[in-house]
Image: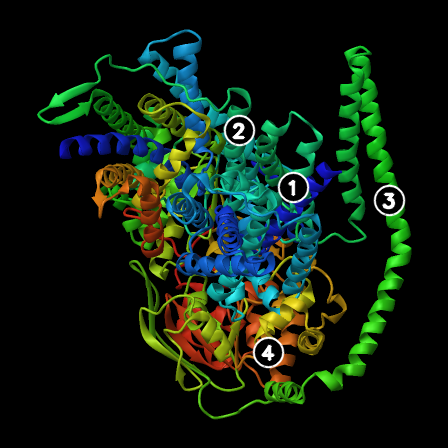
Amino acid sequence: MILQTIVTGLSIGSIYALMAVGYSLVFSVLNFSNFAHGAVITLGAYVAWAVMTQYLHLPFLPALIVSMLGAGIIAFIVERVAYSTLRHRRAPSLYLMISAMGVSIALQNVLYATIGANLYALPPIFTQDSIQFGTAVISRMDIFAFVFSIIAIALLTVVLNYTKVGTAIRAASHDSEMVSVLGVNLDVLVAVLFLLAGSLGGMAGVFMGVKYMVYPSMGWITNKAYIGAVIGGLGSLPGAIVGGILLGLLEAIVSVSVVGGVHLSTFRDVFSFGILALLLIFRPTGLFGRYVEEKL
Amino acid sequence: MEYAQAIFTNAAIYIIATMGLAIFTGYTGLFSLGHAAFMAIGGYAAAILTYFLGWPLMPALIVSIIASVLVSLLIGYPTLRARLRSDYFAIATLGFGEAVKVLFENLPLTQGARGLPGIEKLAGPMNTAVIMVITIWLCRNFLRSNYGRKIIAIGQDPVAAEMIGIKLLPNQMLSLAISAGFAGLSGGLLAHYITFIQPAIFNMDLSSLITAGVVCGGMGSLTGPFVAVALFIVIPELFRGLALWRLVLYGVLLVVIINFRPKGLFGYEEINLKNLPKLFVIAGLTVGLTVGSSFYNMYKAYWSTLASLAVAALLALAVTFGIALLGRGLVWILSRILPPFGRWLRRISDALYTRFKTVFVPVKRQQQHAEMVKKRASVSVTGQPVLNVRGITKRFGGVVAVDELDFCVYPGEIHGLIGPNGSGKTTVFNLISGVYPLTSGEIQFNGGIISGRLPTEIVLDGITRTFQNIRLFGSMTVLENVQTALHTTSDYSLAEAFVQWPWGVRPTEERLYQEAYNLLEEVGLSDLAHRVANTLPYGLQRKLEIARALALNPGLLLLDEPAAGMNPKESQDLVDLIRHIHDTRHLTIILIEHHMDVVMSICDRLTVLNFGSKIAEGTPDQVQNNPMVLEAYLGDKVEYAPAS
Amino acid sequence: MLLRVDGLNVFYGEAVHALRDVSFEVHPGEIVSIIGANGAGKSTLMWTLIGLLKPKSGKIIFMDKPYVPAPHRMVSEGMALVPERRRLFPNLTVRENLLLGSYLRSDRAGITQDEEYIFSLFPVLKERLGQYAGTLSGGQQQMVAIARGLMSRPKLLLLDEPSLGLSPVLTNQVFESILEIASKGTTILLVEQNALKSLKISNRAYVLEVGQVMREGTGEEMLRDPAVQAAYLGVKQHKLVETGVD
């Protein structure tokens, strides 16, 4: 039972981490919360659904790659359409956030208006999903999602730390204007950023789709990932990973808890937002966040 | 007809909620994504009272307002106190909205997800319309009052607002509470109009609708969001088959508006005679498209698609132009009629007011006003230092910005604070005004310790300042900037403000107007009193900033590089102004300045900083001859040959 | 001519006219300085030249090519800016800071060569390569900032207030290295509040007041100009005689 809860928690937590990393990457450089990330993730899942069940009938791994690419490109297009004008105008980050909210509302409802509100299942990855471990039943899918997410995040870390573009991204998280003064084309850098964030999001979307279902409002789950990112400290990569996994574990524990005869699973989301509220009030910088004093 | 009534009532209900959100989001710039939750709370509160207890509508609505306000205070206090960045605040409110929904889904009283069906239909077009009109009137009154000005100021520049002594937390909470109150009212009406209530009604779509209304209608405006939400409700009804795409439209509109016209339809202005034609263009477009599309739908069966489309397009264009033109004509006529009519109304109300002023404005209040004016005019002169800075140190991480600094400023002197760039001068101002906490040391003002107190308290104690980069309330008028700073002398209550209680609000507002005008006269800006502040030339903005600081009747004025970026004539003007206010008010001033001619000509004494420490102090003459100062400014005596 | 600026006008928003009809030129191999009070528009000029601020009107011709208001274009044409307050990336090591300076280059051999050149200018940096830039002292940070600017192998190096916040000894070191960089053939446009020092090392200089070029001349001429002396060369004129000017 405990093992099972931990594995579930780790798997959902690692998916949160995948999404949270996307929030943090964008936030670190552009200093706004990209509330359109959820819609991108949803579209990533729909791409997988389309290529697996509607057209092409691809097997899982190629489909995963296609939807990662698809989500990355969608994220890039969203940036071009909804953010780049504002960026060039140096608009306040509030405007970017509003624009992101607009994109999120629009994309989600485009899905409702075209494909509809139906729930679609993605074909299972494993024919025999559960492994018996003593009394515990563990899902292969959960382990698979966890391992894959960790690999993806590790690759991202390598890119950020050992390539020139990655170094520029880390530098831009501190002072993007200065990065551009050194000759880095910010438009290209931001495009890379959104491609990275989007494709990780697409991966998360596919895992979500396999684990639950594919439907237009599934992007709502990213609010949790956002909470994970805030727990770790928005803008911090290790923070997003730790925060996401921590939140996943906590939720898994809450879901199986019973207090005074009441199953807490109903209140799981309230619990997550409760954590967020407490954190924002008492430590808004999160676990790894940095604090910047405003200049007058 | 019934159909039109239904649309109208729906629109009116949402407009009430939107007016509330406009007061909060539109003026503070904080996004509440959980505003539907306040509607839900109001809706359930009212519905439970009429449904289970058989209350009549009006008292139930009042309870729904109270319930929403109380809850808003409960969630507003911790979140606003923490001064979250705007996106954190948005996500926190989103979480709040979610929590409220889950709560209503699980409470026995609210009957879970099924909700309360069969609520009596107590709300209709008539009472909803009346309540909507009252709502708009109340909001307008509030915004025009001293309370409203404070909230507007915070939205435009929270730092500048604090530096004229406006506390952020209580004012932002007030704004949220008002906003929640109207949302609750709107929820209560909604429940009694659609006759059932369930948690699913109050979802993200609803929050998105009113948020999109405020952004597209224009932040800092009431009439803008009014028009926007009305259009949002009406347009999808006009185009059938569009229902599914309605939310897509809101989203796209948000993106388009914020990218290409961030002030929305009527940002930072209300509908008036000048911009009324714009409204007719919008109305014309709406009607034109409706006419065109219904024509197309009717005739496409008979004519070829292309032909019917072409005729429909022409028709739409014609109708749009027609209405726009009609609007222009109407505006032309109105502009002949309304201003004289307005003047006439004003005269009558003025006459009535003067006639009954003596009867209704309590004598006690009149006396209070007289005393206040007298008190503000008096100056206390003692031999004690006004400001006594004792061994203050400020570290940022490992960097010591100010190091064990001591200096005194005596009553009535103009004290210069000079030093090379980066020597810590502005940091000293930030320490005096409490923006940064001290690492160690102590600051006394008029004998009392002020270090450790809040910036707003220090301002109200009597230390005001101007900023290196001018910080005005940009979209307020020149006069309003100063009126806002007079907030401490306003004495009417919030309730009086809401109804514009003539015998409470009016005498005070008249006094504030006069005082603000006098201050503008003092700095030579009275001719520009009604210009929008950010359209003033740079030099005059600086003067306005000084007038605003003077409005708090300070005992000590901190001027941070007032002559920066000014040409010699402008800086001479400024020197004259500083000397003038110093002489007439016997005001103590600390001045940071790089223009040495300015410093030398008006400062009584100077303190020279380098690397955060004092390297010299004395009269301008003494300082100029001090070798340490020369070295700080000129470097040492090493010679360089020019590169060849 | 390396750089020619003609009738440049730059605005902040609608109301603030930051540069008014600014014209000047820089010839290859020169050190040209621009002096002026705070708020005169010196930094604005630098940010405009590198392409970050868009001028409203006027001509900028660099290396005989038309100007494009995009920093990555100007850097690839051979301009580099060392901005006011250094603006290092404190979360990156010194090595990574330098690496970003050479972002547009791919000639490994050349980069290594330039690194050696930088270590010859600032030997202390060699020991600090692995250290986070945020942990360096002010003087070392200024060295890294200049080194980062040099890593793109610029034809024209824009230096904005390199002596800001430095003690006299460190200021001297910075000015010495500026002379050395210039002697290796890099042209320098220098903005300084320390007018005396910058005029002493400059071939030519311009005075900027409230966004306008008010005076120009050789460094020597400016040092002797009584108006410049009164406004920029310090607190009192007769004192300057004692400190060795003239």
Position of the N terminus of chain B by quadrant: top right
Left or right: residue C7 versus residue C53 is: right
Q: Which residue is mark 2?
A: A109
The one nearer the camera, B489 or B118, is: B118
Q: Chain of mark 2?
A: A
Residue furthest top in the image: A56
- Amino acid at the residue labelled 2: Asn
Q: Note whether B378 is above or below B89 in the view shown.
A: below
Q: Chain of mark 4?
A: B
The one nearer the camera, B113 or C173, is: B113
Q: Which residue is mark 3?
A: B328
Q: Position of residue B84 (x, y in %)?
A: 42, 54
Other residues around mark 4 within 10 Å, as few (<14) / some (14–19) / many (≥20): some
- Please say if the residues under marks 1 and 2 sit with CB atoms less than 8 Å apart: no
Identity of the residue drawn at 71% across and 51% down: B126
Other residues around mark 1 within 10 Å, as few (<14) / some (14–19) / many (≥20): some
- Amino acid at the residue labelled 4: Thr
Which quadrant of the view contains residue C120?
A: top left
Q: Position of residue B284 (x, y in %)?
A: 79, 36
Front disc: 3 or 2: 2
- Please say if the residues under marks 3 and 4 sit with CB atoms less than 8 Å apart: no
Residue B261: image tag: 1
Q: Which residue is mark 4?
A: B489
Name the colouring of the figure: rainbow
Residue C42 visible in the current orientation = yes
- Disc 2 element: helix
- Amino acid at the residue labelled 3: Arg
Question: What is the distance, in whole Å, between disc 1 and disc 2 at their CAs?
Answer: 23 Å
Which quadrant of the view contains residue B138?
A: bottom right
Front disc: 1 or 2: 2
- Please say if the residues under marks 3 and 2 sit with CB atoms less than 8 Å apart: no
